[in-house]
Image (cartoon, coloured by chain):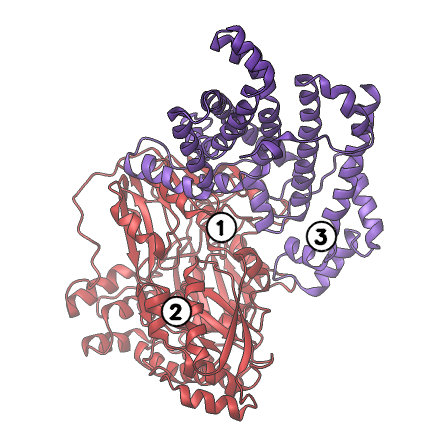
Amino acid sequence: MKTPILARLVEIAGTMLAVSFIVYLVLEANSGDVAVKVLGPFSTEDQRALWMHQNGYDAPFLWRYLEWLARFAVGDWGMSTHYRVPVWQLLPERLGRTAMLAGATLVVMIPVSFSLGILAGMAKGSVADRIISFFCVATTSIPEFASSVFLAAIFVFWLGVLPGASSMTSGFAIRELVLPTLVLALYSAGYLARITRASMVEVMEAPYIRAAMMRGVPPARLVLGHALRNALVAPVTVIMLQIPWLLSGVIVVEVFFAYRGFGSLLYEAGLNSDIALIEACAMISVAVVLATQFLSDLIYAWLNPRLNRKTARADAAGIPSETPAAGAAP
Amino acid sequence: MFGLKMLSGRRLHAAAPELCDRLIRGEIGRRDFLQTMSWLGVSAASASVFASAVVGDALFPTAARAQEAPKRGGSLRFVCQIQEMTDPAAVSWIEASVVFRNTLEYLTLVDADNVSHPYLAESWTPSDDLKTWDFKLRSGVKWSNGDDFTAEDVAYTIKRWLAPESKSSNKTSFAAVTQVEIIGPLAIRLHLDRAILAIPEMLYAYNCPILHRKFDDMGADWPKNPIGTGPYELAEFAIGQKATFRRRAGYWGTEPYLDEIRFIDMGTSSAAHLAALSAGQVDILYRIGVSDLDLVKRLPNVQLLTGKAAQTIVMRMQVDQKPFDDIRVRKAVLLAADNQQMLELGYRGEGTVAADYHVAQVQPEYFPLPPVKRDIAQAKALLKEAGHPNGVDVTLMVGNTQGTWEQNTAQVLQQNCAEAGIRINLNVVPSTEYWPVWNKVPFGLTYWAHRPLAVQTLDLAYRSGAAWNETHLADKAFDAALDKAMAIVDVKQRSQAMEAVERILQDQAIMVQPFWSNKFTAISSKVRDYQQHPSDYFNLFKTWLA
């Protein structure tokens, strides 16, 4: 296991390096705008030229990139031009907030979708299966921006039972977490339940389950003891794939509910062309994507020991392990 | 004379008796009379008594309200953007001033009716030729760090606007000031190279707060060192997040009611703002958009405030950029535009139609100039003459800085112009992308905030070489006509002098200025004595929470 893990880590570092170059290229190639951003639209050409010179913007591009990379690597991530504070000061709080939202979403989503998926998959074609499948398709096909509006219309404007903005301006309030969590959980739970169901159906039709059934193993033991572990391989991969989405893909929900998380930070950074901040956010997103992929490989191997020997070589060669999620998707 | 008193106790300004005669003869209204008298340094109270005696009671009485005794205390939550405000004189956003206004104060105070009142200046006296202005400053005012407020602070602040390295737009608006003279510990004199009547009003512009005389020495970063003369002190500040003010002891004026004011930045989603207001999480929204009206009218615990103001959008063309360097192309655009339709479809009719010269009916110097009559045939003929027989392609940049109604309005213009063969390609960008280039694009849609006087806007926007001259108009005749209008005390004469100013702007065809948009905001039903201000210069010192 040691060598493949090391190889995977080297691969992760290589990917991050490549992404960092692309990010820098896209954002900093046109350096003229940076001075305008920092000094304001009423600054003179002379002031801008002086600022560019003072901040090393007249050096060759590749040299600037290497300098930036060196600074970035040691934690000097520059100043946010919009918030006027060092970038690293902004990130911990925002990441923490988003992690909290993501955690809450997972806590709601996983039990709900596993139960629904198992319930539906246990008896394919039953009434329960049909109702659950309909519910899953319905929630998954409503995008977050629409369900945000619906839920706010019902719970904030009509019933008046939940707060409409989740800025947590007076400190942490669990009530303010309810609506964004609900929107995210509704959207992703349907999908996860469908995956769980498909996976469950497949396992339930496997010969060893049929054999157990014929031997008279009680249904509860059959599902929990024999089918579940194998049926969870695909859903767990899906959950791992959803973590990056919960980090940067929740922009719509965070902005709609004025939730101060990583997604809205990235949105505001983009809106204000806050280059240093976009760079840091992009690198963090990439790091999280790679870390969850790495983690899902490990969990996957643990859930399915047969894959250990098979994927060791593939991992070392840099070939991503097969993702049954894609195949199992409805 | 007439029972009118100067704030300074000196002799009445030479122009005052003539104004009284005109009021008596019914040639000017009560509001214009009060406004002009206040500029001349006449006490608003005495002018009001005089006006009531002549024309009866106020025409714009404050809405009758059940008499409630104001309650002291409480914390008010105000939603607006928390912007960078390192140098309060250099900010270009009114929202920033709504925040620092609680600590920093101005020489004068212009109320919602455009009448100027004493503030840090106790009184002012212009010379008869309006070129020398004496200001007597309030005594007993202390900075929050314990220093006395003196004429040095005022002189320092004004000189800083005018310095060569100044980044303040005040450099243009106060360009006529040649000298700032300290004539006593609490008295300053401004020397102007041309006559300007509205100096007291101009001193209440959002970026004119008086700074401490050691502002630059103390780091020139206001939120880091938030010294002020106002009743509140800045307790917390984070751009994009929050600014909290707490009442401080030792304020020179009347104690405000609120203990704490919390400005909260809730991002750009107006849905979140309204939801927060509806759920009682916040008390006042800075403003709401025209598309939010239907929802707000249905919310039970929310008051909708609305008002007319001289705020507008201009779809302006740069006179030195192709194809707009040919006046015939610009005229063709104006001839094709249907301003009434833009108001109805773009802004749901919630405003007043305008006529392409950027002077509003609500401004005192307004001269009613007829609008450009829509004429597609003539527009086509002009285009042909200008060498575009098959029409012309142009790109209009829209930043939706005030909401998507800007884009909706531009789409109407696009349809209007298509009839004349002017094919407009709309380039819609986020507002933060528009502001860095707003004065650089050849054809762009720019929002202009209300200013009490049209000449203030025109001076900043259309004078040759002015800081915010986005059309690049350089017309000596216009500059001269504007100078002339700015020096006339008499409202009627000034309005007549504006005819030439407005005509040049309209004839130059530099902008389609379709309408004046009404203002809207929504506040919690608990909020009392909060008044809309046409310039968005909200003052919370009398506001209280029931």
Which chain letter matches label 2? B
Q: Position of residue B254 (x, y in %)?
A: 33, 43
Q: Is residue B403 above or below residue B524?
A: below
Q: Is residue B243 above or below residue B495?
A: above
State the hue of chain B. red
Which chain letter matches label 3? A
Q: Nearer the viewer, mark 1 or mark 2?
A: 1
Q: Which residue is mark 3?
A: A26
Q: What's the residue at 35%, 84% (across, down)?
A: B373
Q: Amino acid at mark 3?
A: Val
How far apart marks 3 and 2 lie (CA) works out to 45 Å
Sequence-wise first label, 1 or 2 = 1
Q: Is residue A124 above or below residue B96?
A: above
Q: Nearer the viewer, mark 3 or mark 2?
A: 3
Q: Which residue is mark 2?
A: B453
Mark 2, other Cα within 10 Å: few <14 / some 14–19 / many ≥20: many
* Secondary structure found at label 1: helix
Q: Which mark is residue B96?
A: 1
Q: Amino acid at mark 1?
A: Ala
